[in-house]
Image (cartoon, rainbow, N blue to C red):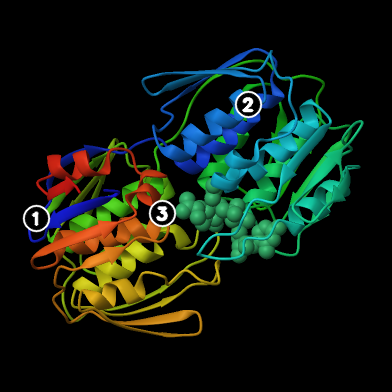
Amino acid sequence: MDAVRIYGGNRLCGQTTIQGSKNASLPILAATLLIEGTCEIENCPDISDVYHMQRLLTSLGCSVEREGMLVRVNTEGLSECDMPSDSVGVMRSSIMLLGALLARAGSVCMEYPGGCVIGARPIGLHLQSLRRMGVVIEEQPQGFCAEVTRLKGAVFRLPFVSVGVTENLLLAAVLAEGVTVIEPAAREPEIQALCDFLNLAGARIEGRGSDRLVIHGVEKLRPVRFRVPADRIVAGTYLCACMCTGGSVFLQDAPVQDMESVLEHARRMGASIDCAEDGILVNGRAHAGRICVLRTGCYPEFPTDLQSPFMVAMALSGCRGQIEETVFENRFRIVPELAKMGADICIQGNTAYIDGCRRLRGAIVHAQELRGGAALVTAALAAEGTSIVTNRHYIDRGYEDLVLRLRELGAAIELA
Ligand code: EPZ
């Protein structure tokens, strides 16, 4: 079955190494299309979203090989510009290939990447921005074809912050004619890693980590070897699992510098957090009676991708909690599933109110998307009795060997 079975109640104890970042790996793999030759990407997580991105690059004529956590991409054979619809359907992140393919090959045809349960996730701002760089885009009912002779730099005053649009414009701008300004640019650590990769390859990007990026177009980029940073969202998920079970876990390689808001909220909920050079030691359950108010937002505010795991930690921690979700319009999908386990959460608009004074009981629950699925697993780890979390494939999109790693930390968990 595509599920996990969990016997709740074990405290998580020990140490686990945090995998490379999914949301840094995907745009960096897309960026290899800008470079003729072979790039070597280290610490590339072995998860299904990365597998689908590798397949997409192969379908475009690149040769892609994985050796442990190293992925080699040779783009000399790049010959296709039409992305296979089955991959686009599975991989929303295929939209990231748009800017890179236009910069390298000058044309792309692809289906519209679907939305998902957390929101409609339209791509209008992507297309509108690329048109301003000289791209001619012909839209059809199912998808679009885009063409450009030479991308031209432009000054962008974006109507809102978008991680994906910032990434696409970066990939389109590094080889474009002239200067491009992106403001407000997304500041996420994954964007900073993409800037580091591109600058190492010879791009000229200024303003890394700020909300204003200035890109001076260059003629060519050179092949590089680059290490993907650790995944702050995966680290935050394990931190929640430790808080939920009242355990003690060392998160080896956790990117402390990228987790300030997450660690601050965990401390406010009563967990003890000790940061070291090479990771984070998390101790104990949050203390009852604390009031926790959380609002998601663009980096460095609290990350929307950890909203569901923290909701579970609040529901289990004796905190009366309140979560305001400001990024996606439908990201409370786990609430009905948590209610099956006895949680008391009510939603008003984009705010969830959590009464954390309840024990949770095991139940059969259904993952509906990546981060919600991981959150249901953390709830089951602490619930009384047995739980089954179905649709494990959602979780496999972003978490490497979750069952094995949790079992190594003492969880009673198995594939079902
Ligand atoms: C990236 O998605 C991440 N995905 C998401 O992580 C993350 O939640 C999100 O950024 C916000 O941090 C990857 O990096 C692969 P956005 P992205 O463009 O780029 C709206 C995970 O679990 N919007 O910053 O799609 C959009 O609908 C995933 O790992 C438009 O309206 O996010 C959303 O409401 C989930 N029109 C808001 O902007 C557009 O043209 C922010 O989205 C583009 C976006």
Residue in the picture at 55% in, 67% down: 328
Judge: label 3 CB < 8 Å from ligand 1: yes
- Identify whether 251 is placed above or below 161: above
From mark 2 to mark 3, how far is it between C-alphas? 25 Å
Using residue 384 as the reference point, say whether residue 221 is left or right of it: right
Q: Tell me which numbered mark, 1 or 3, is placed earlier along the sequence.
A: 1
Comparing 188 with 134, the one in front is 134
Assign a secondary structure to mark 1: loop
Residue in the picture at 43% in, 48% down: 258
- Identify whether 130 is placed above or below 359: above
Count every numbered label the image shows and give the total.
Answer: 3
Splitting the image into 4 quarters, where does residue 346 fall? Answer: bottom left
Q: Which of marks 1 and 3 is in front?
A: 3
Comparing 360 with 151, the one in front is 360
Amino acid carrying mark 3 in the image: Leu
Percent x, y for residue 265?
33, 65
Comparing 181 with 41, the one in front is 41
**Whether residue 374 is visible:** yes
Q: Tell me which numbered mark, 2 or 3, is placed earlier along the sequence.
A: 2
Residue beneath disc 2: 59
Please report contact status of discs 2 and 3: CB closer than 8 Å, yes or no. Answer: no
Percent x, y for residue 50?
48, 35
Assign a secondary structure to mark 2: helix
Comparing 387 with 24, the one in front is 387
Q: Which of marks 2 and 3 is in front?
A: 2
> Alpha-carbon neighbours of circle 1 within 10 Å: few (<14), some, or many (≥20)?
many
Q: Residue 11 carries which label?
A: 1
Q: Residue 370 carries which label?
A: 3
**Whether residue 299 is visible:** no
Amino acid carrying mark 2 in the image: Ser
